[in-house]
Image (cartoon, rainbow, N blue to C red):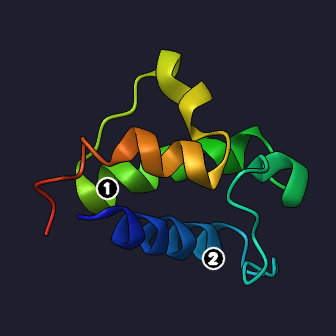
Amino acid sequence: MVPTEIRDAIIDILADIAPDEDLSNLNDDQSFRDQMELDSMDFLDIVMELRKRYRVQVPEEDYVNLESMASTVSYLTPKMVAVA
């Protein structure tokens, strides 16, 4: 997957986890928590969905890399390069 596809995949996951959130104006450089009402369980749901949908493992020590859309896409790009 290329970065734009990864961003779209993250948007899909966020839409499933927080269906009431307006994701159309998401600022890629601002943290998800500052823009959305996500709690720690929602964040874990993101990690679990990445594993379930794309077989991407995110170790707990790497959770900090999933703070914003920009950092998430940057972190996932090398991990998802072979995902079709």
Residue at image location 37% in from the left, 62% down from the top: 3
State the residue in front, 59 or 28: 28
Mark drawn on residue 52: 1
Q: Is residue 76 above or below residue 26?
A: above
In the image, residue 7 above or below residue 78: below
Q: Position of residue 4 (x, y in %)?
A: 40, 71
Q: In the figure, is residue 42 to the left or right of 81? A: right
Residue drawn at 82 percent across, 47 percent down: 33
Disc 2: which residue: 15
Q: Amino acid at mark 2?
A: Ala
- Residue 26: assigned label: none
SS category of the residue bearing label 1: helix
Q: Is residue 16 left or right of residue 31?
A: left
What is the quadrant of the N terminus in the image?
bottom left
Q: Element under label 2?
A: helix
Q: Nearer the viewer, residue 66 or 27?
A: 27
Percent from the top left, x then y, of residue 12? 51, 76
Which amino acid lies under the numbered mark 1 shown in the image of this protein?
A: Lys
**Badge 1 density bin: few <14, some 14–19, many ≥20, Cα 10 Å:** few
> Which residue shows up at 46% across the image and 75% down it?
8
Q: Earlier in the sequence, mark 1 or mark 2?
A: 2
Residue located at (64% from left, 67% from top): 17
